[in-house]
Image (cartoon, grey):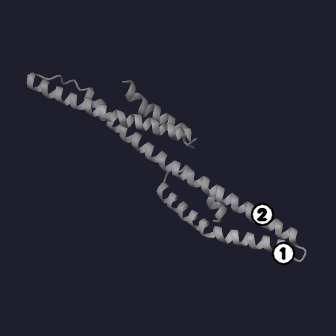
Amino acid sequence: MGTSQVAQEENYRDPTNIQQKHQKQQAFEAELAANADRIATLITAGQNLIDGAKCAGGEDAVSARLKALNDQWELLVKTTTEKSYRLKEANKQKSFMAAVKDLEFWLGEVEILLQSDDYGKDLASIENLLKKHQLLEADIMAHQDRVQEMNQQADSLLERDQFAGQQIAERRKVGLAMPLTE
């Protein structure tokens, strides 16, 4: 696979092995950085040939080749930067989705506890249930900050024109908005 294909590949859309994809992208960026000086040296040498009139009348051809090389290099750097950004965003999205899933699991457990028909049989069992309920309320309050933080994270992902914006908005609506309204 050529370097421009690697840079333009949209593998960030598939969240499978996103960490490995990000590591490969970092290696690719390092390779680009290692070759940046070679490209700059080549362009400078070509320009020196043109300026020194050492092209035996082929200055236009050399100039055209230098322009094509520079344009291709700039496109490669631009697409690589864009892909790196998208991979980072995909990684943030994956983390967000995992956090929403964890929160939804916790909410499911809370709902089960709240739907209990056990109101106690005597004073001791009622006091025990009251303590459990107070602990549950404290746990809910502790999770409120997490829900707000996740809503802010969703806002941030959506503001950045995340490629899976609709999925993020839907998970946010189902997983994060519901607990705050109940």
- Looking at the image, the residue that sits furthest to the front is 52
Q: Residue 62 in the image: state x and y as whole percent.
A: 83, 70
Query: Between 23 and 52, which is closer to the camera in this rendering?
Result: 52
Q: Secondary structure at mark 2?
A: helix
Amino acid at the residue labelled 2? Ala
Q: Residue 72 in the image: state x and y as whole percent.
A: 72, 61
Instruction: Tell me if I can see residue 8 in this picture.
Output: no
Query: Between 135 and 105, which is closer to the camera in this rendering?
Result: 135
Instruction: Tell me if I can see residue 108 in this picture.
Output: yes
Q: Secondary structure at mark 1?
A: loop
Q: Earlier in the sequence, mark 2 or mark 1?
A: 1
CA separation in Å, label 2 and label 1: 21 Å
- Name the residue located 37 percent from the left edge and 29 percent from the top edge: 179
The mark closer to the camera, 2 or 1, is 1
Q: Crowding near pointer 1: few (<14 within 10 Å), some, many (20+)?
A: few
Q: Crowding near pointer 2: few (<14 within 10 Å), some, many (20+)?
A: few
Task: Name the residue beneath numbered marker 2.
Answer: 68
- Horizontal arrangement in the rendering, residue 167 relative to residue 33 (left or right): left
Amino acid at the residue labelled 1? Gly
Task: Name the residue beneath numbered marker 1.
Answer: 52
- Name the residue located 41 percent from the left edge and 44 percent from the top edge: 98
Q: Quadrant of residue 125?
A: top left
